[in-house]
Amino acid sequence: MTLNVPTYADVQAAAQRLKGHAHLTPVLRSRFADEMLGGEVFFKAENLQRMGAFKFRGAFNALSRFDAAQRERGVVAFSSGNHAQAVALSARILGMPAVIVMPSDAPPLKIAATRGYGAQVVLYDRYTEDREAIGKRLASERGLTLIPPYDHPDVIAGQGTAAKELVEQVGPLDYFFGCLGGGGLMGGSCLAVKALSPDCRIYGVEPEAGNDVQQSFRIGKPVRIEVPKTIADGAQTQLVGTLTFPILQRDASDILTATDQQLIEAMHFFAERMKLIVEPTGALGFAAARHAAATGSLPLKGKRIGILISGGNVDMSTFCRLISSLDGTPS
Ligand SMILES: *Cc1c(COP(=O)(O)O)cnc(C)c1O
């Protein structure tokens, strides 16, 4: 099966399918953020999306395109994070079976949440077993359709609906900053932002320890890295997608990075100033924009800046530990 690189028309079609199912998330403003970045900052709050992250958009779009036979047999996905819950919730809404392959040492809360959406969870040992092989075996044995977390045209198109909404909500932008793992979110964002705000400069932001896409972007071909050590657990990908990379190469101005410390500072800012719970990965865009403003590496002064907050799924003890590590430091 060959999969085609999606276009903006696919994002528009995805938006139609998501109507009435995904939340139209708010765009939030903050005077402090405007002062910090020196422009007008528009935060698209996907931490307030269903199941707490934009991933619902791509999963629901992909599952709603299944034909009758696929729906009957169901879907399989492998993920320890937001994609698992997004597929499980979408399958429940669409009334189809879901099997999620998760590492046996995934946080018990996440396993419980995935089961709570009615999915069957298959656990594997992440040190001795290959989750992709398990997923593929389940797919062929039971006739399930495998939906990957980012490298799939319907997933990319669905993820692009968040940026589409943002530009429709606030008008054209000069800059867009979003979070980057395998590139589903940024690939879809590129399609939407370039269509609706063609002059906007687009930046994907990775954890500094896991800058595989930045390396790939600079040398012009995909670079694989070891599993990065970072608190940004939603962006611990090792290799950019074969569908997402060409979109980024064509449409992104550059790929930036943020350190774990910068992510914690951004999470602290969101909590203290905007009363928002943001997971470490969800803070990547703002962390990099803030750093760019502080160092003057991008001319953000007086500009209209869109920042996508991608998710808010962090357990409270981790959140409190990260935030309190900054105690005494003003945000
Ligand atoms: C999955 C995820 C990302 C990265 O998305 P990709 O499509 O893999 O680039 C960023 N933030 C959150 C909260 C996520 O769950």
Image: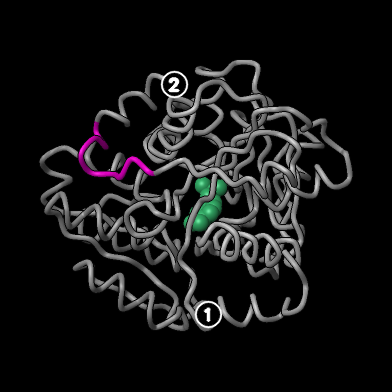
Under mark 1, the amino acid is Thr
Above-or-below relation of 74 to 167: below
164 sits to left or right of 261: left
Q: Residue at the location (43% across, 29% down)? A: 169
Give residue 123's quadrant in the image: bottom left
> How many numbered marks have been drawn onto this rendered protein structure?
2
Main SS, magenta residues: loop
Q: Indicate the position of residue 326 as horizontal and vertical percent values.
A: 73, 76
Q: Indicate the position of residue 24 as horizontal and vertical percent values.
A: 33, 40
26 sits to left or right of 72: right
Q: Residue at the location (64% across, 57% down)? A: 238
178 sits to left or right of 146: right
**Which circle marks residue 8 in the picture?**
2
Give residue 292's quadrant in the image: top right
Marks 2 & 1, CB-CB < 8 Å contact? no
Under mark 2, the amino acid is Tyr
The mark nearer the N terminus, 2 or 1, is: 2
Disc 2 residue lies near ligand 1 with CB under 8 A: no
Q: Indicate the position of residue 1 as horizontal and vertical percent values.
A: 38, 34
Q: Residue at the location (60% across, 43% down)? A: 178
134 sits to left or right of 204: left
The kind of secondary structure element at disc 2 is: helix
Q: Residue at the location (30% across, 39% down)? A: 61
Magenta span includes 22:
yes
Q: Which residue is mark 1?
A: 128
The kind of secondary structure element at disc 1 is: loop
Label 2 and label 1: CA atoms lie apart by 41 Å
